[in-house]
Each structure stands twice: as structure tokens, then as C-alpha cells.
């Protein structure tokens, strides 16, 4: 059946079964490949997007559950203040290695920063422990989130 | 593994410049594929281009395009390789555009490996001289072209920031303006490379060229390939290794919206659909009966028992020094142990995938691979085509760790594509990826040592059994029952051991494919040797660092990193009850590394690695920031294996399936890692895998210090550490 969803401010109509996860609608139907497939069971966080600003695993979020909510993906997160600061911190601090998990990491980190401008280590653990990185960039992720938080405090 | 026994295609790591020139002239640059690149689309070769060798192309528009012979899988080669070329070519990193190298073993083989592959931590070791020479050759020819244009002596010209400058008059010409003429200049017979004190890029932190695309979702991995007309497929391979499809009922699957086709192979089924969800649903709806085959009863314990038995018989002698038998007989104390390490899956974050389009007389492949020429050769075989009829588009790699040195995924995709009209992207589910990996081998070790009255080791004997990945992957390197990977870290130890004997017994497990896995041989051997030397220190009632140090008179570089790691970690400091320090020391992949791990063991037996201090001497550092990142990452990868990593089989099936049953270290459990690099002007060593092998024994030794329990089998078993 047909669903209309709003992604990064644009409306898209797709004709898929209602139980189709948003991940596959984004990647295979809308050709937005920045959101990654990692596990299909909300265990690794590679597919994280925002739904109305909340970090959400798109691999277990069905298309029929989205309704009029706003979906934001890695392709659009740079247009949000928190997302732009996180992306900049990621570059300044050279976080990425293979990079495959980083779309999801950035989406989780952006949601964290938007809701908690000065996250503690415990906040970072809670918000980021759902995102696996096999390259082992965890230390830099933690440091980059703190860097992004500081840039906010400074008004940067 | 250092492959020192392997006859290299090119002696002493120097690529033949003339060979490149001849080859480049032959292909005219026209065969160099323009792919989806991190820095934007590559440009097709133009006629007015300067192509001095297989790595550098300078257009008349001034664009400097570098062809990357080593792939980018996170380890930073797409930054450090350009640094080598740019250093000698005298261009800034911002002026560069990058291309993935096409399959061509004549041009792009790793000189240390003899094949076109990125692995074994040797991209930098292989590239160090030839890639700087590639840059220098181009620079000399550009200078020659400018000198001719100005009619001056080339010695009065120099290159800087993409320009040739006539020093006496200050005249300047940009490289682009010289491209056409430079192409006509004779190649210099030999080039003199810069002295280290003249380096302006090498040794300074360079920003990763691939990073911007990786933070905004535009970086393209193999799984992101979308050629026109693409269908998506997912597959189920025989759950028992070696099994076959008996029957398929596809009525329900075909009724699912978006499902286009069911593909049946001998040992697998695939559902082809409009998108992955339809393919997954279709696969779930398929009723497949399997013929389990000869391995239907196979269990991990059977394999372990077979390996254990194998260590009771003699094997191939990997190294023998002195007379172990005599020394052992005269020893005051004897220490004997057995060690085991499990099968491990790679679990790259990007699940296995490959897109294939088989046409009448050619095949096109989209993939992220560490071994593009191997993919081409094996896909050609599967397609029944000559290799040159297989076009391979390589991509960024979402985690390699050795998994993507294999071409099994490309073969599968071709087998499926044979039955599909148009391009098909085959995507492994995570479950399929973990249950049909090619695994880090299981190894079993029987090791013993004799100590003199002062506790000093006078005899060391080690015999271990397991799979030889090399024997399958690179047969010429497997000789007389030995290969350079299986034994690395077990022989040529840093310690002064006067009577030393090591044997390897090759035993291939039935049905289970084995493969390289980040640090491979050393991932096993360093765990065993560094745990065992710790046992000897304990038997001698000596401090673990002091005991090692006393055996390092002949290895000052090893002693220096051990001292540095101990000092920075505060070795000897009293830790709270239930916590402990563990040390490890290794020389593998051409680099020296010492680690000190600080762990905490709870009453329930759970282990937390709090802090890791690393000291390393890796020779000349190219990009210090990448070195830090790779060591941090390697340690995290190894710590994950030590704490959680284990693939087990029952009834011929892998029991683990996704990240709930094959767990990964996460940010809330990740240790803080400090990396200290010793300054060195030796040639670069490898470092992408060193942290992985070094951390496992450091953790095991720290657990011993914290609890008194010696863990001789990985991964850590909390039940053994639980306090009553």
C-alpha cells in the first residue's frame, strides 16, 4: 500500500507493505544510502535516524508507524544545530575509521546533544551504548561529543 | 606474518619503475576506472595527461589524481599513501584526488605479498619506498619539462606546491601547464629520495581525506552500489557446513509483494526482490529442506579434541635453537601448560554483500574488497569468463579485518546473477554473515619450559596445531608444513632463550572454512607466549616486567617499549582488591609493542578492562594521528575477542547469529587507551593489527594478577573467576 513520509523536510510516497522497516524504504526505495544496515534487530545502531528528534533504530521501525512524524537522516542532520556541531567535532577530532557505523553514531550523538547540551560520561554511555563500532573509535566518539558540547557553551 | 619466506614478485620491496612506465604507456591510462570516490567522481583519462607511473596522473587542468594500490577500510591508507606520494611530488594534500585501483596485479601487487591485496599490516611497509619513488619520478620529469621550456639547467629549478620554480629568476609554471611536455620527458634512471629531516608531510598529523564523506552519509561502500535496474537479493546457505538443498517450496514466498524470483543453488537459496525487506520476507516464507551432509554431527569439542591429539605427535619444526631436550633435563623446575583459542567471526559492521551483473560475454561486479584481483579471478571462474571480461568496481570498505580478503561473496553473487536478468545486489543478513563466515582458526598449544635455580628459562618448547590459512589462500607460501602467518609471534621472540624449539602441526577442521582475522597468527601466538612467560615469572616468584626485562639484553628496542609502558602505566602501584595489572610484549608485523592493561574483576567474575597503556616502536611514523587511532582500534578489537569472542558449533551449525549472541565491546565498557610512540628513523613497521594481538595476553595476565586464576583458554570465562 501507499505511504507518504516526510524525510529531511521532503515528502515521499512509497508503495510497500506496512510492515516494511523504514531502513529499507530509505535505502532501497528512496536511494538514501547514508543510513546503514548492520543487524536488522536494533542491536547495533548503524541504522539510527531521528523521528521527531528522537534517535530511533530504523531497522525495526515499520513504515506504517511513522504517520506524520518528521524523519531526519544522516543526509539531513547537518541542517540541525546539534547535528552540525557533532559533524564538525567528528572531523576536528578525526573520529572515523572505516566509517560504516558513523552515520548511526552521529545520529545518536546529535540526538543526545540536542536534548542534553552538556552530557556527562554517564549520559554518553546511555545514549551511545546501542551503537557498535568494530573499528574501536569509542574513545574519540566520547571526546568528540564533549568537544561539540563545549563549542555550544562557547556559542560556537 | 611477514612473508619473509615468500619469493616476492619484486625483490627487496622496490617496484620496477621501468615496468610501470612501460605498462602505463601500454594502457595509456584509459583502463584506469573512474569509480565512486570519497573525493568526488574520478575523471576519465584525458589525452593531454602526464602519467609517469601507475600511481600518478596529472591533467593539463592541473588536477593530480592518485591511484590507490591499497584499499581504505578504516586504517587510513587513503591518507597515508597520498602523503608518501605528495611528499616527493611536492604537492599539498588538498590538491589531490583519489581513485581506487582496478584489478591489475602487474601494476598494483603489494611487493611484500606478491599479490594485489591489502592485509597483513603491510601496506605502508610495501609502499614506503616505491610510492615515494613514484612521486619523485613525476617531480623530476615535471622539472625537466620546465627546464626545457625555459632553456635552463634543471638543477636551477625546484618543485613546490604543485609548481616548478626557476630559482634564479623566480619564474613559475604550474604542473598542469607542464603535463603535456612532462609526458615526453625521459624517465629518470634512478631517483634520490628526501632525507627524513626534509620531510614536510611525513610524520605530521594529516587530516583524513575520507572523513568528510563519512560524516554526512555520502561515502559509498559496496552495499550502497545501485546500478540502474538493480534488484536486491538475500540468501540462506546450508545451515550445516557442507550440506545441500534437498527441496524448496516457494509458493508462499512468491506471493509476497515485491518478490521477483527464487534462485536455487546446490547449497543455497536466494530470494530476489525489489527491496531487501521483500527479499527477507520471501526468504522467511520459503520452505527449504536441507540435506545435512557429512558434518551433521560436528561440534566444537570434537575439533578441540582432534587438535589436542595432534599436539601429541610431532609437527613441522618452525624454529630450533640449542638443545631443548638436554636443557630441559637439567632444569631445576619444569612448567607445562596447554592453551586454546576459539574460532572467531569477523562481524564487520558492513555485512557481506556483492552486486553482480552477468551479461552475455562479460560480468560487472560492485564490491568493497581487500583483494580486488582475487575477486576478479574468482568471479571470472564462477561466470565462466576470462578475467579481463570481469569489470570490478571497488568501494570503501565497511570493515575488513581479513574477511574481505576472501572472494566467496563475489562467487556467490555471480552464481545468483547467472539466473537473474539484470544487476542483483546480494546482501547477507547479519545472521547469515556470522553463521557463514570464514573463521579465525581454532588453535591448540602444548607448551613447556625449564627454569634454572634462579628461575631463568633455560629451555622453551612449544607445539601447536590448527589450520593454515595461507596454505589455501597463498599456496606457494606454504612450504614443508609451515607458513609465515601461523608461526608469527611463536618464533623469533624478543627474549633471549638459548634452547628453543617450536613445531606447528597443520590440521584443517572438517567442513569449517578458516580465514585471516585481524592479526591472524599473532592473535593466537602472542596470547600463548605472553601468557606463558607470565606463568614462568610467577613460577620464579618474580615481577612480570622485571622477569621479561632480564631476557632482553639483545633486544634494546623491545626493552625500551617495555620500560616506557611500565613507567607510563605506573606498574607496581598497588591497586584495589579485585584489580590487577597485566603486561605483554611482542615483535610482530615489524613493530615492537608493550601493553599494560588494568582490569577489575567483580565478585560475579565479570571482567572490566579499565585502562590500557601502550608503548610502541613502529619505525618511521607517517601519520601520527592514524597510528594512535589504529592502535586504539586494534586494542578494542582484541579486547572484544578476549572478553566475548567465540564461535561454537553443534550438529554442524554455528550457534551464534547476531550481536546478541556474538557480543561486541560497547562504549560503556571500552577502556581508556593511552598510546606512547617511541621516536624512530627505522623503516615503518605495520601497526593495524599489533594492538589486537598484544591486548589478549595483557588482559589474561591482569586477571591472574587480580585473582590468581590463570586463564589458558579464550575468551574469558566468568564462571572460573566467580568468588564463592
Image (spheres, coloured by chain):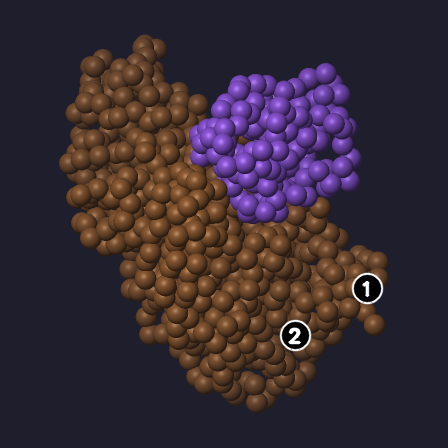
Chain colours: A purple, B brown
Instruction: Reply above or below: B367 against A145.
Output: below
Real-space Cα separation, disc 1 to disc 2, in angstroms: 27 Å
Determine whether the residue tagged by mark 1 lies in a helix, strand or loop.
loop
For this view, does A2 lie left or right of residue B614? left
Q: Callout 1: residue from which chain?
A: B
Tally the numbered discs: 2
Which residue is outermost to the bottom? B329
Q: Residue at position x 79%, y 61% from top?
A: B602
The image's mark for residue B603 is 1
Q: Residue at position x 34%, y 18% from top?
A: B163
Q: Do the residues labelled 1 and 2 touch (CB within 8 Å)?
A: no
Q: Which of A146 and B190 is in front in this view?
A: A146
Instruction: Reply above or below: B188 against B113.
Output: above
Instruction: Reply above or below: B513 against B271.
Output: below
Q: Which of B410 and B227 is in front in this view?
A: B227
Crowding at dot 1, Cα within 10 Å, few <14 / some 14-19 / many 20+, comes out as few
Quarter residue B646 falls in: bottom right
Q: Residue at position x 65%, y 48% from top?
A: B666
Q: Callout 2: residue from which chain?
A: B
The image's mark for residue B536 is 2
> Where is residue B377 drawn, in percent x and y?
26, 51
> Where is residue B462 drawn, in percent x and y?
52, 77
For this view, does B10 lie left or right of residue A91? left
Q: Residue at position x 78%, y 35% from top?
A: A120
Taking the image as drawn, is residue B44 in sight? yes
Taking the image as drawn, is residue A34 in sight? no
Q: Which of marks 1 and 2 is nearer the N terminus?
A: 2
> Where is residue B139 drawn, in percent x and y?
30, 27
Q: Nearer the viewer, mark 1 or mark 2?
A: 1
> Where is residue B276 drawn, in percent x and y?
45, 42
Q: Nearer the viewer, residue B429 or B536?
A: B429
Determine whether the residue tagged by mark 2 lies in a helix, strand or loop.
helix
Amino acid at each position: 500500500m501507499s505511504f507518504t513520509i516526510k524525510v529531511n523536510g521532503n515528502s515521499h510516497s512509497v508503495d510497500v507493505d506496512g510492515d516494511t522497516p523504514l531502513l529499507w524504504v530509505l535505502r532501497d526505495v528512496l536511494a538514501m544510502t547514508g543510513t546503514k544496515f548492520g543487524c536488522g534487530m536494533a542491536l547495533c545502531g548503524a541504522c539510527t535516524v531521528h523521528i521527531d528528534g528522537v534517535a530511533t533504530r530504523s531497522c525495526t521501525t515499520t513504515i506504517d508507524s511513522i504517520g506524520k512524524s518528521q524523519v531526519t537522516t544522516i543526509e539531513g542532520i547537518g541542517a540541525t544545530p546539534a547535528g552540525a556541531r557533532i559533524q564538525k567535532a567528528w572531523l576536528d577530532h578525526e573520529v572515523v575509521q572505516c566509517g560504516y557505523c558513523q552515520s548511526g553514531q552521529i545520529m545518536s550523538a546529535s540526538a543526545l546533544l540536542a536534548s542534553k547540551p552538556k552530557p556527562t560520561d554517564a549520559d554518553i554511555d546511555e545514549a551511545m551504548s546501542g551503537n557498535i563500532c568494530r573499528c574501536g573509535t569509542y574513545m574519540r566518539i566520547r571526546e568528540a561529543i564533549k568537544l561539540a558540547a563545549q563549542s555550544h557553551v562557547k556559542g560556537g | 606474518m611477514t612473508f619473509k619466506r615468500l619469493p616476492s614478485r619484486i625483490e627487496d620491496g622496490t617496484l620496477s619503475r621501468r615496468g610501470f612506465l612501460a605498462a602505463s604507456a601500454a594502457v595509456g591510462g584509459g583502463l584506469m576506472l573512474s569509480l565512486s570516490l570519497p573525493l568526488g567522481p574520478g575523471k576519465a583519462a584525458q589525452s593531454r595527461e602526464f602519467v609517469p607511473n601507475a600511481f600518478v596522473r596529472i591533467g593539463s587542468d592541473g588536477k593530480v589524481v592518485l591511484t590507490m594500490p591499497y584499499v581504505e577500510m578504516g586504517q587510513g591508507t587513503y591518507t597515508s599513501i597520498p602523503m608518501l606520494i605528495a611528499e616527493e611530488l611536492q604537492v599539498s594534500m588538498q590538491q589531490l584526488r583519489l581513485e581506487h585501483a582496478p584489478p591489475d596485479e602487474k601494476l598494483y601487487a603489494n611487493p611484500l605479498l606478491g599479490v594485489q591485496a591489502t592485509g597483513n599490516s603491510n601496506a605502508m611497509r610495501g609502499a614506503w619506498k616505491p610510492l615515494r619513488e613514484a612521486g619523485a619520478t613525476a617531480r623530476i620529469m615535471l622539472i625537466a619539462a620546465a627546464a626545457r621550456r625555459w632553456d635552463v639547467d634543471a638543477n636551477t629549478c625546484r618543485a613546490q606546491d604543485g609548481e616548478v620554480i626557476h630559482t634564479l629568476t623566480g619564474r613559475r609554471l604550474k604542473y598542469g601547464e607542464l603535463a603535456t611536455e612532462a609526458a615526453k620527458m625521459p624517465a629518470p634512471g634512478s631517483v634520490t629520495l628526501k632525507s627524513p629531516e626534509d620531510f614536510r608531510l611525513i610524520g605530521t598529523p594529516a587530516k583524513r581525506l575520507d572523513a568528510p564523506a563519512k560524516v554526512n552519509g555520502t561515502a559509498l561502500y559496496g552495499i550502497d552500489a545501485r546500478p540502474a535496474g538493480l534488484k536486491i537479493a538475500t540468501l540462506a546457505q546450508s545451515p550445516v557446513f557442507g550440506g545441500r538443498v534437498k527441496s524448496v517450496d516457494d509458493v508462499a514466498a512468491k506471493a509476497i509483494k515485491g518478490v521477483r524470483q527464487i534462485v536455487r543453488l546446490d547449497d543455497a537459496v536466494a530470494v530476489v526482490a525489489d527491496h531487501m525487506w521483500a527479499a527477507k520476507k520471501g526468504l522467511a516464507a520459503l520452505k527449504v529442506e536441507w540435506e545435512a551432509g557429512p558434518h551433521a554431527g560436528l561440534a566444537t569439542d570434537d575439533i578441540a579434541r582432534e587438535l589436542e591429539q595432534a599436539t601429541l605427535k610431532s609437527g613441522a619444526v618452525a624454529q630450533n635453537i640449542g638443545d631443548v631436550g638436554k636443557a630441559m633435563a637439567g632444569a631445576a623446575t619444569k612448567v607445562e601448560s596447554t592453551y586454546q583459542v576459539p574460532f572467531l567471526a569477523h562481524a564487520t559492521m558492513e555485512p557481506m554483500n556483492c552486486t553482480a551483473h552477468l551479461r552475455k560475454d562479460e560480468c560487472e561486479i560492485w564490491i568493497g574488497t581487500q583483494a580486488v584481483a582475487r575477486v576478479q579471478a574468482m568471479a571470472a571462474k564462477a561466470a565462466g569468463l576470462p578475467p579481463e571480461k570481469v569489470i570490478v568496481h571497488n568501494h570503501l570498505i565497511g570493515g575488513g579485518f581479513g574477511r574481505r580478503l576472501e572472494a566467496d561473496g563475489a562467487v556467490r553473487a555471480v552464481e545468483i546473477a547467472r539466473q537473474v536478468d539484470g544487476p542483483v545486489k546480494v546482501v547477507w543478513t547479519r545472521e547469515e554473515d556470522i553463521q557463514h563466515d570464514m573463521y579465525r582458526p581454532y588453535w591448540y598449544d602444548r607448551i613447556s619450559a625449564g627454569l634454572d635455580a634462579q628461575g631463568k628459562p633455560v629451555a622453551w618448547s612449544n607445539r601447536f596445531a590448527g589450520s593454515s590459512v595461507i596454505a589455501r589462500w597463498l599456496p606457494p607460501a606454504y612450504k614443508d608444513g609451515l607458513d609465515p602467518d601461523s608461526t608469527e609471534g611463536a618464533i623469533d621472540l624478543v627474549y633471549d632463550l638459548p634452547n628453543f624449539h617450536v613445531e606447528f602441526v597443520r590440521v584443517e577442521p572438517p567442513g569449517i572454512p578458516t580465514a585471516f582475522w585481524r592479526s591472524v597468527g599473532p592473535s593466537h601466538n602472542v596470547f600463548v607466549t605472553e601468557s606463558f612467560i607470565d606463568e614462568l615469572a610467577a613460577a620464579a616468584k618474580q615481577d612480570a616486567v622485571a622477569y621479561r626485562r632480564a631476557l632482553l639484553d639483545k633486544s634494546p628496542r623491545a626493552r625500551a617499549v617495555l620500560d616506557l609502558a611500565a613507567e607510563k602505566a605506573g606498574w607496581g602501584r598497588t591497586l584495589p582488591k579485585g584489580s590487577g595489572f597485566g603486561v605483554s610484549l611482542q615483535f610482530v608485523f615489524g613493530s615492537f609493542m608493550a601493553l599494560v592493561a588494568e582490569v577489575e574483576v567483580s565478585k560475579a567474575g565479570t571482567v572490566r578492562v579499565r585502562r590500557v597503556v601502550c608503548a610502541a616502536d613502529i619505525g618511521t611514523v607517517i601519520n601520527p594521528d592514524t597510528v594512535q587511532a589504529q592502535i586504539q582500534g586494534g586494542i578494542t578489537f582484541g579486547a572484544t575477542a578476549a572478553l566475548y569472542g567465540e564461535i561454537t558449533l553443534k550438529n554442524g551449525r554455528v550457534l551464534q547469529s547476531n550481536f546478541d549472541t556474538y557480543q561486541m565491546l560497547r562504549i560503556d565498557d571500552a577502556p581508556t587507551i593511552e598510546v606512547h610512540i617511541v621516536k624512530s628513523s627505522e623503516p615503518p613497521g605495520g601497526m593495524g593489527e599489533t594492538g589486537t594481538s598484544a591486548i589478549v595476553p595483557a588482559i589474561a595476565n591482569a586477571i591472574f594478577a587480580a585473582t590468581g586464576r590463570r586463564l589458558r583458554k579464550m575468551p574469558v570465562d566468568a564462571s572460573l573467576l566467580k568468588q564463592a
